Image (cartoon, rainbow, N blue to C red):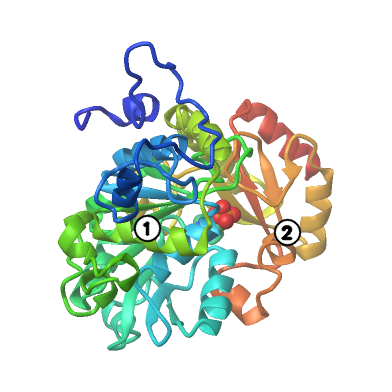
């Protein structure tokens, strides 16, 4: 299986039917599973035998998706969650508790920013935000003795800057903590952050992995490479009283992190993915490679058109030759830089809103990264909770429009933009 290329993995990995079994991964719409003996069930509960027993913890349909994404990212295991937000939260809670601290790029998804700045804070976990383009020394100065992770996005939503994953991984490892990368916009087709030193990956599968805007979901993937035995992560090493004193690192070796995320956090918090959503997400994922190729080529053409337009103040797309992120994009995203563009229209916020209302093919939706071209005005929607100062830090101008380029015919997309101008 390992030698398969990404296109083959998208289609074939995660589920292998046996003789006479369904060709397509079945929807196992069952909360629970039947066993012949009490003893067997006891073994399942003690994590001594593999097997599904309750869909909050694991389910065959969900597992097929987990195995496919783990293979695509090159990880030792994965865990599906109810949403991308749940993936970020569980990824952090799995290694942080009240009194701990994390360092995060300040250029992240608005929902993640709120989770980090407001909700985690209420839970006693502090987050310091840093400019990912700052010097190593400057980023390192945000670390404290109680820091447990460094967090960033491969292609940040909505600023669209490309993360220097190797630099961030070096900083994290020097400080004895894992680098957690949100790889949602890049997808495992365009970038595999583990190859550059990231330790944990999360995705909002709601975006390109599903790709058709049917299912909200998330996933956490574990590289298996981080050494949790450095004294900073007792929760992974020391006996867990909720499992009769089992140690995750001792029992599950390099899968300790992802096993704990499942058997402790999904068990206790319950933000699991449903089998139906896993089925739909997996169906979408089967064509990820084809879709991403077209998203990338369409978006580059639209970005070049916008850059040449008199109506536009500036265009942000890391694939453009003029982009300050072009060299990082060439290194981390050689196959393309995804389908999301942002641009500033001449005429300010009013003109931005007027332009958007005139679009016909591109729809106004609070979503990005599916097959249909869509637009969004971040300042008045996804990021309206942020203060002007936070907006500026996240790279959002009032006249900025985010355009998620779909896989329709690119001439139709450009004609729609032209008539709206
Ligand atoms: C949408 C998004 C999330 C949150 O995912 P949900 O599935 O909406 O909870 C997290 N990170 C990024 C980069 C996103 O675009």
Neighbor class of circle 1 (other Cα within 10 Å; few <14, some 14-19, many 20+) is some
Pinpoint residue 373: horizontal percent, then vertical percent: 66, 38
Residue at 28 percent across and 59 percent down: it is 198
Q: Residue at x 55, y 43 (%)?
A: 274
Q: Position of residue 376 (x, y in %)?
A: 70, 53
Residue 282: horizontal and vertical position, in percent?
A: 48, 33
Secondary structure under tag 1 reads helix
Q: Can you identify the residue that label 2 sits on? A: 346
Which mark is in front, 2 or 1?
1
Q: Residue at x 52, y 47 (%)?
A: 273
Q: In front here: 66 or 265? A: 265
Residue 252, placed above or below residue 229 = above
Q: Is residue 236 left or right of residue 219?
A: left
Q: Callout 2: 10 Å neighbours few (<14), some, many (20+)?
A: some
Q: Secondary structure at mark 2?
A: loop
Please say if 198 is above or below 279: below
Look at the numbered disc 1 and say if its residue's Cβ is closer than 8 Å to ligand 1: no
Quadrant (top left/top right/bottom left/bottom right) for the N terminus? top left
Q: How many marks?
A: 2
Ligand 1 shows up in the quarter that is bottom right
Question: Where is residue 202, by image quadrant?
Answer: bottom left
Residue found 18% across the figure and 80% down from its top: 231
**How far apart in space, not on screen, are marks 2 and 1 (Cα)?**
52 Å
Asked whether mark 2 and ligand 1 are closer than 8 Å, the reply comes as no
The label number, if any, that marks residue 296 in the structure image? none
State the image coordinates of residue 284 (x, y, percent, origin top left).
52, 31
| 89 and 266: which is toward the camera | 266
**Mark 1 lies on residue:** 263
Q: Is residue 228 left or right of residue 149?
A: left
Looking at the image, tell me whether mark 2 or mark 1 is earlier in sequence order.
Answer: 1
């Amino acid at each position: 299986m390992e030698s398969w290329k990404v296109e083959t993995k998208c289609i074939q990995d995660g589920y292998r039917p046996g003789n006479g079994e369904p060709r397509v991964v079945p929807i196992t719409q069952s909360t629970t599973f039947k066993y012949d003996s009490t003893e067997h069930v006891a073994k399942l509960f003690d994590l001594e035998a593999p097997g599904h027993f309750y869909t909050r913890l694991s389910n065959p349909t969900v597992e097929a998706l987990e195995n496919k994404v783990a293979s695509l990212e090159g990880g030792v295991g994965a865990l599906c969650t109810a949403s991308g937000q749940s993936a970020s939260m569980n990824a952090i809670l799995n290694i942080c508790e009240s009194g701990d601290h994390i360092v995060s790029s300040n250029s992240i998804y608005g929902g993640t920013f709120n989770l980090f700045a407001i909700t985690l804070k209420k839970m006693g976990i502090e987050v310091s935000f840093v400019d990912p383009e700052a010097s190593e020394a400057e980023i390192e100065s945000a670390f404290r003795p109680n820091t447990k992770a460094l967090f960033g996005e491969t292609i940040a939503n909505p600023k669209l800057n490309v993360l220097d994953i190797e630099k961030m991984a070096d900083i994290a490892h020097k400080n004895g903590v894992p680098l957690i990368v949100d790889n949602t916009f890049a997808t495992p087709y365009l970038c595999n952050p583990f190859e550059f030193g990231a330790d944990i990956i999360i995705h909002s599968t709601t975006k390109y992995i599903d790709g058709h805007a049917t299912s909200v979901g998330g996933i956490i993937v574990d590289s298996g490479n981080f050494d949790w035995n450095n004294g900073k992560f007792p929760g992974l090493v020391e006996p867990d009283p909720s499992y009769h004193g089992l140690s995750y690192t001792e029992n599950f070796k390099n899968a300790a992190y992802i096993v704990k995320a499942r058997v402790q956090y999904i068990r206790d918090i319950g933000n699991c993915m449903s089998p139906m959503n896993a089925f739909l997400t997996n169906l979408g994922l089967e064509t990820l490679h084809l879709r991403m190729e077209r998203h990338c080529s369409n978006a580059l053409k639209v970005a070049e058109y916008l850059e040449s337009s008199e109506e536009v103040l500036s265009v942000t797309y890391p694939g453009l030759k003029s982009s300050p992120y072009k060299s990082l994009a060439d290194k981390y995203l050689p196959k393309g830089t995804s389908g999301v563009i942002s641009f500033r229209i001449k005429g300010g916020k009013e003109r931005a809103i007027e332009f958007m209302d005139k679009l016909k093919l591109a729809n106004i939706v609070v979503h990005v990264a599916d097959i249909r071209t869509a637009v969004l005005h971040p300042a008045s929607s996804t990021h309206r909770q942020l203060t002007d100062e936070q907006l500026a830090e996240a790279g959002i101008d009032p006249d900025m429009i985010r355009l998620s380029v779909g896989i329709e015919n690119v001439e139709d997309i450009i004609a729609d933009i032209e008539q709206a101008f």
